Amino acid sequence: MTYDHDLASALPDAIDPVAFEILRARVRQEVEAGTLPSAQFALAYRGQLIAFETFGAASNQALYPIFSATKAITSALSWLSIQTGALDIGAPVGNWIPAFKAGDKALVTVLHLLTHTAGFPNAPFRPTDYFDAERRQARFEQWRLEWPPGSRFVYHPTSSLWALAEILEQIYGRAFAELIKTEIAEPLGLPELFVGCPSPEHDKIVAVSHVGAAPSAKDYAELNLQPPPVSEVTEAAIDNFNTAEIRAVPTPGGGGFMTAATLALFYQGLLGYSGNSSDFAQVPWQAETLLNARTIRTHGLKDPYLGFDVLRGLGIVIAGETDQHLRGFGHGSTPTSFGHGGAGGQIAWADPVSGLSFVYLTNGHDRNPFRQGRRGVSLSSKAVNCLRG
C-alpha cells in the first residue's frame, strides 16, 4: 500500500486546517524534544485517508507494533462469526475448549472473554506456545479463576483473547493469522494489516525502546494513587517485540504490526466505509453487527484502579458521556466514539457520528504513565477539534 505524503494539502472542507496544524505540531512536539524516537499519525474521514505523516527516526513505510490496539482487530473478527450465527456471546467457552468444561471455568462465556470479566487476567501463556496445539491446551487447563466470571472487571492483557482466538480457529477451521488476512485485511484492501508479522516484512518494523523515568512512590502519593499492580506487560515483554520470534507470533491481544494509515482505515471499515464508498455491502460487517458491537455490556462495573465506570462493548472501549479522557478519548468526543489503545501510548479510535478515525503510534514506550496519559488526551482532543463546528 502506498500513500501520498502530501495528503494534508487537500484536506476536505470538514477539516479545519488551523486545528489540523495544531494537531501536527503536538505529534511532533516530543519527537523534536528528543523524548520519543519517532511518532506516526493518521486521520481518515468518511472512507478517505486525509492525513498520514511520520516524524523522527522512521518513514511512512515503517510498521509499528500496536500492542493492545490489536484487540479491536481480533474482536472485529469475532463479530463476523456472531454475524453468521456461528458464535453466540452467551455460549460457554467450554463448547470449544475442553479445559473450560468443568469446575468454575464452565461458567466463563464468550462475552466474558470480550469484556475482561472472565476472571483470569494473570493466566500464563507463553506467546510461542501458540504454535504447539498440545501446549495451548495445557495452558488452558492450567488456568484458574481469581473470582466468579462477570462479577468484576480487571483488564486481561492477553489471556482472554488467546481463548477467543482458539474458538475462532475452531469455527473457521483455519489459522488465526490467515483469518485476519482473509476475513479483514483483504476485504478492506489493507495488505499490511498484520497480526503476527511475516518474516519478509520484519525489516520495516521500527524497534521499540523505553524512554523516560518511571514515577516514584512519592509521585503516586502526591496524586493520592497507589502504584499500579504488576502485570505481564513488563519492559522485558515489550523488548521481546524487537525479536523475530515474537514478531512472528499472531498474539491476538497484542501482536499487530502496521502503519497508522492502515489502522485508521481499518477503523473506517468499522464505521461502514470501504475505500471511497459508504456502502455497507462492501465491508465485511453489516450495520446491525457494528451497532451491536458498540453496545455497552459492562454497566455497573468500575475500573479497579481509578474507579470510573467501565464502558466496554464487544472487545472495544466506548467513550461515554463522562470521564472520556480516562478511557483514552479526547475532550469533546461524542459518547459513541469507540476504539482501543495500546501499551506505550498507541491511540486508535473512531467516531460513528462524524465519520472520523484517528491513530497515533510511537516506538518510544514511555515509563511515565502520567505523561503518556496527558499526551494521549491532548492528541485525541486536538484530533476531535480538527472537525469544523
Image (spheres, rainbow, N blue to C red):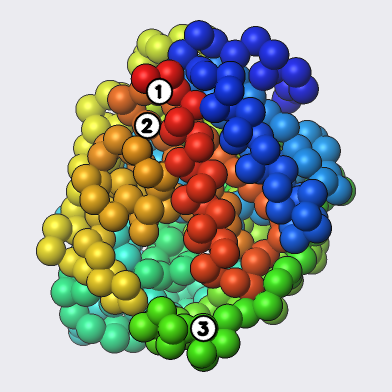
Residue highlighted by disc 2 = 351
Residue highlighted by disc 1 = 355
Q: Name the element at disc 2.
A: strand
Vertical placement of 347 versus 252: above or below? above
Q: Quadrant of the C terminus?
A: top left
Vertical placement of 10 versus 250: above or below? above
Q: Which residue is the extreme one toward the left?
A: 300
Please name the amino acid that badge 2 sits on. Asp
Q: Give x and y (percent) for residue 181.
A: 59, 37
The one of 151 and 248 positioned closer to us in this rendering: 151
Whether residue 234 appears in this view of the structure is yes
Q: Give x and y (percent) for residue 105.
A: 25, 78
The one of 136 and 293 positioned closer to us in this rendering: 293
In this figure, what is the number of numbered marks? Answer: 3
Q: Give x and y (percent) for residue 321.
A: 22, 45
Mark 2 → mark 3, Cα distance in angstroms: 34 Å
Dot in front, 2 or 3: 3
Q: Are marks 2 and 1 in contact (CB under 8 Å)?
A: yes
**Residue depicted at 52% across the width and 19% down the height:** 16
Please name the amino acid that badge 1 sits on. Gly
Mark 1 → mark 3, Cα distance in angstroms: 39 Å
Q: Which mark is residue 219?
A: 3
Q: Residues within 10 Å of mark 2 (few under 14, many from 20)?
A: many
| Residue 384 falls left or right of residue 49 | left
In the rendered structure, which disc, 2 or 3, sits on the residue that comes first in sequence?
3
Q: Residues within 10 Å of mark 3 (few under 14, many from 20)?
A: some
